[in-house]
Amino acid sequence: MEGDTDEIPQGMGTYGSRSAAVGGSALATSSQKVVEKAKKIAAHQLEASEEDVEFDNGDFSVAGAPERSMHIQDVAAQSYLAHDMPDGIEPGLEETSFYDPDNFVFPFGTHIAVVEVDPDSGEIEFENYVAVDDVGPQINPKIVEGQVHGGVAQGIGQALYEGAEYDDNAQLVTGSMQDYTVPKAEHIPTMETDSTVTPSPHNPLGVKGVGEAGTIAAPQAVVNAVTDALQPFGIDHIDMPLTSETVWQAVNDGAAADEGGAGGEAVADGGEQSESSGGED
């Protein structure tokens, strides 16, 4: 099922990871209305009391007599036969719901980056990356995992590669994909992902947005890991993006400031975690 703004023009968009929390809640509310109406129709067709009809996995059945059942597809077809409907029930099985959340939802997570930095070249390599996020109940865990992977990739791009550069005439020189560096698949580490589940009280599904989870946590986890690795050189801050040239320059500046150079191994290791939360509609 996909949203189509030609069919449903009223809406505010999918920004802020609001699709599941807002659109999903509207869908859940409409679905519940459909089930409630379908239960009345099924009870009429099964010659049973509505209170005795149960709905499970697409089937309506009479409690204690599971052989007396109707699939929701059959109920839907029956709902358009106006001559055989329960009293007071209009034909058709369509419902519309508008959902306006009473508050924001807040996903939480902890991301840990472990990196190896070569101070002689400024090159950064990932040793490991672990992401644990709480986005509430997951409708489709595979999609959630993909969102985390994609978000982390974008966060790594922000931390290490992406920047708006201008020349001496204030002209943007990174205005196209030929000049603006983004990470390739080979630059993204293998990730370990996991989750905890704390339902949100602000929507019927208990879900929270996941779109920003990776992008919020990854930059600071990566940058902190790099600066942690470079502590022997007296470095505790580097402005993003941490390109190899920027890191190399920071190491050399730190060594020069240490009266002849700070001692350190040829390769510096660092691991840092970033605990983050994101507010999303």
Image (tube, rainbow, N blue to C red):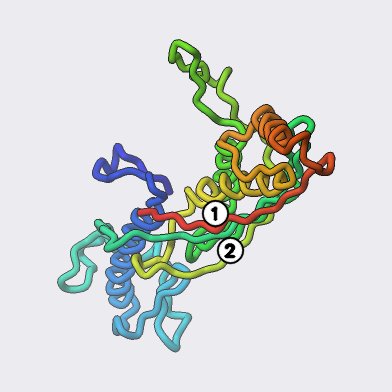
Q: Which numbered disc flags the more N-terminal residue, 1 or 2?
A: 1
Foreground tag (1 vs 2): 2
Q: Amino acid at mark 2?
A: Ser
73 to 125, vertically: above or below: below
Q: Amino acid at mark 1?
A: Val
Q: Which mark is residue 144?
A: 1
Crowd around label 1: few <14 · some 14–19 · many ≥20 (10 Å): some
Crowd around label 2: few <14 · some 14–19 · many ≥20 (10 Å): some
Q: Residue 44 location in percent, x, y? A: 28, 76
What residue is rendered at 37% in x and 45% in y? 14
Residue nearer the viewer, 69 or 198? 198
Does residue 92 appear to the left or right of 157 in the view shown?
left
What residue is rendered at 51% in x and 22% in y? 165
What residue is rendered at 51% in x and 16% in y? 173
Q: Residue 19 location in percent, x, y? A: 39, 51
Q: Secondary structure at mark 1?
A: helix
Q: Which mark is residue 195?
A: 2
Q: Residue 7 location in percent, x, y? A: 29, 41
* Quadrant into which the C terminus falls: bottom left
What residue is rendered at 55% in x and 58% in y? 275
Q: Residue 54 location in percent, x, y? A: 39, 79
**Count of residue discs:** 2
Does residue 48 appear to the left or right of 150 in the view shown?
left
